[in-house]
Image: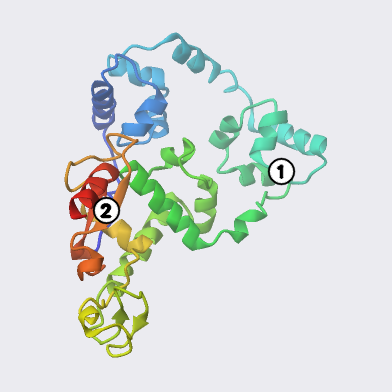
């Protein structure tokens, strides 16, 4: 069961974007909508929509939604630095480096001491390091980032995907859903989309490892040891429960099961995409202790409530 990423949207029409904003507002039953609210349930990036129409206020106006006083104030403040030249921004970046006594520093440090916001700099330059280099400084490198194993980044993508009940987006990372920064994924893989594609390739490799080998080796249901057919010291009555797969459900297989089940409980249909409090588990259909294997066709997605109820019934 190989899977692919959601289709990457190209040439999205203005109408499609505005219709999606209206859809989210109706879903939330609100007469107004913030960018953060849209980012959590929208199909497109809130920043992408703002770039298309000029501002979030304009988007609300075109969707015939209301705008509150805070959104109006934010829109006005966003134009305060539009007259600032690139050289003025770079000069201020250099000034902060002098104040810190460093040839390189983080965007967070600039936010603390700079005259302008980092978001303004990010909009003018390709990246924070691009701004540093153009200011005559050295690129900023996180010392700890080199120690982050690629598998740990994949595990974080899997965790976000499962907890959100959908494919994670750039906005999810910007909203703090990941313990790693967006730039960490971008530097490692060349962009968030590339990170997702690498993750998909990594997960799909699990297809070969979840297949049983057809030999006589396996794991004993009683003692848990990996043995050949005649190596277990338990009575013959117990040998019928010797498995060809391990009981533990590894991360990649767990993800494949949830992806197949659309990140919904197979019993009640609950999903974290609709209720963030929902916690999903992967469970054996035929219990492992009764001879069930840890394979894709013998695993199912259950919410914590249904999984507990299933356990009570099987006792």
| Point 33% across, 86% down: residue | 233
- The correct choice, above or below, for 203 with respect to 223 in the image is above
- The correct choice, above or below, for 23 with respect to 312 in the image is above
Residue furthest bottom as drawn: 230
Q: Can residue 50 be seen by looking at this rendering?
A: yes
Tell whether 241 sits left or right of 219.
left
Tell whether 143 sits left or right of 27.
right
| Point 57% across, 35% down: residue | 124
The quadrant in which the C terminus is found is bottom left
Q: Residues within 10 Å of mark 2 (few under 14, many from 20)?
A: many
- The correct choice, above or below, for 271 with respect to 35 in the image is below
- Picture coordinates of residue 146 (x, y %)? 61, 59
Task: Please give the label number shown on residue 69.
Answer: none
Circle 2 or circle 1, nearest the eye: 2
| Point 54% across, 34% down: residue | 123
Q: Quadrant of residue 282?
A: bottom left
Q: Which residue is mark 2?
A: 258
- Picture coordinates of residue 283 (x, y %)? 26, 56
Tell whether 14 sits left or right of 179.
left
- The correct choice, above or below, for 229 with respect to 189 in the image is below
Q: Which residue is mark 1?
A: 105
Residue furthest top as drawn: 69
| Point 72% across, 50% down: residue | 138
Q: Residues within 10 Å of mark 1 (few under 14, many from 20)?
A: many
């Amino acid at each position: 069961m190989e899977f692919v990423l959601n289709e990457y949207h190209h040439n999205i029409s203005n109408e499609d974007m505005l219709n999606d904003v209206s859809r989210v507002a109706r879903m939330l039953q609100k007469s107004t909508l913030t960018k953060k609210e849209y980012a959590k349930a929208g199909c497109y990036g809130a920043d992408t929509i703002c770039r298309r129409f000029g501002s979030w206020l304009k988007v609300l106006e075109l969707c015939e939604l209301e705008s509150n006083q805070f959104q109006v104030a934010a829109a006005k403040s966003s134009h305060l630095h539009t007259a600032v030249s690139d050289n003025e921004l770079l000069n201020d970046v250099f000034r902060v480096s002098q104040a810190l006594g460093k040839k390189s520093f983080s965007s967070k440090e600039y936010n603390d001491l700079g005259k302008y916001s980092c978001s303004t700099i990010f909009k003018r330059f390709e990246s924070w390091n691009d701004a540093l280099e153009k200011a005559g400084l050295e690129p900023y490198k996180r010392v700890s980032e080199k120690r982050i194993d690629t598998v740990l980044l994949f595990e974080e993508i899997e965790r976000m995907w499962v907890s959100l009940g959908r494919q994670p987006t750039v906005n999810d990372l910007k909203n703090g859903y990941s313990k790693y920064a967006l730039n960490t994924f971008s530097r490692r893989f060349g962009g968030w989309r590339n990170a997702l594609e690498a993750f998909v390739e990594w997960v799909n490799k699990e297809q070969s490892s979840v297949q049983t080998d057809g030999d006589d080796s396996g794991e004993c249901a009683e003692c848990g040891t990996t043995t050949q057919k005649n190596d277990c010291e338990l009575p013959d009555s117990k040998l019928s429960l010797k498995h060809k797969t391990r009981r533990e459900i590894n991360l990649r297989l767990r993800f494949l099961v949830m992806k197949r089940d659309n990140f919904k409980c197979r019993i009640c249909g609950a999903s974290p995409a609709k209720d963030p409090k929902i916690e999903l588990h992967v469970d054996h259909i035929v219990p492992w202790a009764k001879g069930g294997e840890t394979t894709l066709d013998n695993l199912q997605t259950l919410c914590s409530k249904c999984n507990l109820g299933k356990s009570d019934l099987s006792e």
